[in-house]
Image (spheres, rainbow, N blue to C red):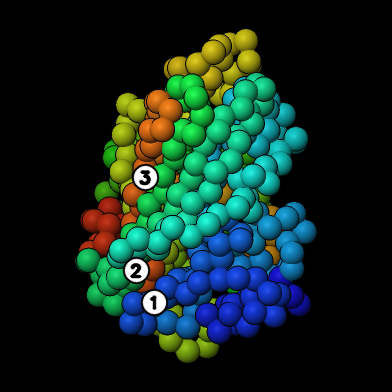
Amino acid sequence: MSGEHAPRTRSDLVRLLESRGTAFEVLEDGPRWALVTPGLAARILGAGVDQENAFWVSPSSPPPSGWFNAGGQRTWLAPEGGPGGIFCGMDLAAWTVPGDLDPASYRPDHGEGAHRWRAELHVRSADGSTHRVGISRSMALGPHPRIPGAMAIRFRHELSNRGDCMLDRRISLWGLIQLPCEEGGGAVFVCLTRPGAAPVPYFGEVPDPVPGDDGRAAWFRLPGGARFKAGIPASSFAGTLGFVRRSRLPRGAPLILAAMTFRVQPVAAYLERAPALWRSPAAAGSGGDAGDASPGDAAQVYQDPGTGPSAFCEIEAHAPAPRLAPGEASAEDILITIAAVDQGKLSDALAAGFGPAVTRIPAGLIPE
């Protein structure tokens, strides 16, 4: 976007979008707010419990790599790569974002109690197949049910089969939040079903995870400036991952928390796998990646190599791939938590929101 500084507050973001002529809608519930840009894949470009935007927004206008890197929370589709990949085939270097998917063409379809946007697109896979699908994104704001002063965004995205043939576990919903990593970065936590479950490296040098108190949480220090990606198999993911960082504003609570909680189905077909586990088109067969014996990942953590205001990381949520007859749909619900927390109250907030596995942050992960 403009200048050398990413917009950090709601006011900054509104001024920027107005200056660029970018349409947006602001959802409000008391002090809680979320800003949606229908023309940019109906992404939640900003959200917070006060003036500070909990999400990252690109400082470039448009971002050098296209609007898909504008920031905020968005919906993509999996698998990312491999024989049925939507962004690339077997060659990760050929990765690109389909314009039908992002920025797409979303239209409002608001209902009682929720704001909703819909889009239809043709998904083209690396194996040459094309599928006509629909995506809807809906959200409602309110106080968090367990963390005092926090915000809950009850988000749902839905995949529908708009074609004439069965869509058999070829495509799945993928939800991402981009978060700021400048000024010392922050720490990602991942809740696990069993102690010591290890992340799956995709690329780059994945930081060694630091276990929580009972081993059922993995913490990663993300200082920014280095590129890596890791996945957490559905068989070992307990349904919550989040990010804690220092506030970027001089006043207010010193820590910002952003997290996603969603249902995990350990035996379902999750399409995301590390590139080392991608199979050749001949091995994949007509069923795409759904029949692969290797476990798919329900959650991912990504850090971009950008620095300064361009430094960001991502927490990513995957739904299992559905089997949809023409006209059928499948949805994933995600509870997005946003909180501004005092240092001494962070452990209580984490425990209240996500359970005993994240009651204590390992020393040294959050920059002073």
Give the amino acid type for the residue marked by disc 2 in the picture.
Answer: Leu
Q: Nearer the viewer, residue 307 or 151?
A: 151
Q: Which residue is mark 1?
A: 28
Give the amino acid type for the residue marked by disc 1 in the picture.
Answer: Glu
Query: In the image, which disc is placed on residue 332?
Result: 3
Question: In the rendered structure, which disc, 3 or 1, sits on the residue that comes first in sequence?
Answer: 1
Question: In the rendered structure, which disc, 1 or 2, sits on the residue that comes first in sequence?
Answer: 1
Give the amino acid type for the residue marked by disc 3 in the picture.
Answer: Glu
**SS of the residue under disc 2:** strand
**SS of the residue under disc 3:** strand
**SS of the residue under disc 1:** strand
The crowd level at tag 1 (other Cα within 10 Å; few <14, some 14-19, many 20+) is: some
Q: Is residue 55 above or below residue 99?
A: below
Residue 49 appears in view = yes
The crowd level at tag 3 (other Cα within 10 Å; few <14, some 14-19, many 20+) is: some
Callout 1 touching callout 2 (CB < 8 Å): yes
